[in-house]
Amino acid sequence: MVQTIQARNVALNDWKTNFKIEWVEDDQFFREWQDDLPEISDYEKQRLDRVKASYRNLLKRPPLLENTVKMVVLSPFLDLADFYLAPFHVTSEKSVEIVDEDEGVIVRGQVDVLALFQEFWVVVIESKKAAFSLEVGIPQLLAYMLTNFSADRPTYGLLMNGADFLFVKLVKREKAQYAFSRKFYLFNPGNDLYSVLSILKRLGQLNVGNIV
């Protein structure tokens, strides 16, 4: 009998057991969020300063729900990173499915926002209620990334809840392996949103270059 699991209910241990993936803590494994990052223009910094100010203002009237987070924080990022322009296109709330043929396990869930180049997933973004920590969404994000598992190139993801941002890289070697960036926080001194945008742009450049 095939077992069906909702992606939102999957724990990290389920992936280790059913899909044989492992967390890599080697700093050299995921250099894309640190190396050769594009510069952010003054105009882009001004836009991101407004995003930070808008989010802080919204927090005065809780609860801040997922759709509001996507509208106020996520949409400006996708615009500034050019994910609304060709060769990218964005598909919202795309249904995905993972099948483990050996164990008879099917995982189903909804991707909040998916940025695509041709048929290649560039960034998967699962936004949560602002009150949720990022950790509760990690298994769900990995579930979505596994549906686009490729043996010859990485898949990247971004997990966010409005104030916190975490990038993820997933690759296939002898087994599936994943790693995290550091966590970026909107209320750190300065504006961490500059770094988040720069990394998004870099991942877009890498993936377009890998396919062209």
Image (cartoon, rainbow, N blue to C red):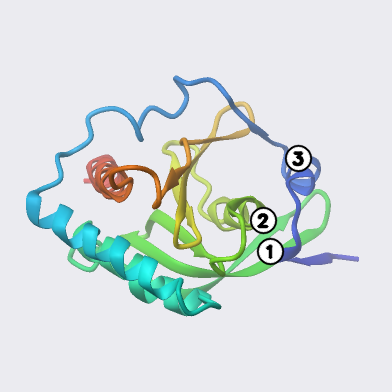
Q: Amino acid at mark 3?
A: Lys
Sort mark 3 into few (<14), some (14-19) or many (20+) by Cα contacts within 10 Å: few
Q: Nearer the viewer, residue 148 or 47?
A: 47
Sort mark 2 into few (<14), some (14-19) or many (20+) by Cα contacts within 10 Å: some
Res 92 visible: no
At a point 9% along the width and 48% down the height, the residue shown is 41
Quarter holding the N terminus is bottom right
At a point 26% along the width and 42% down the height, the residue shown is 202
- Residue that numbered label 1 is attached to: 7
- Residue that numbered label 3 is attached to: 16
Mark 3 / mark 1, whichever is N-terminal? 1
Mark 2 / mark 1, whichever is N-terminal? 1
Q: Position of residue 191 (x, y in %)?
A: 29, 47
Q: CA distance from mark 3 to mark 1?
A: 15 Å
Q: Is 80 positioned to the left or the right of 132 in the image?
A: left
Q: Is 78 positioned to the left or the right of 57 in the image?
A: left
Q: Amino acid at mark 1?
A: Ala
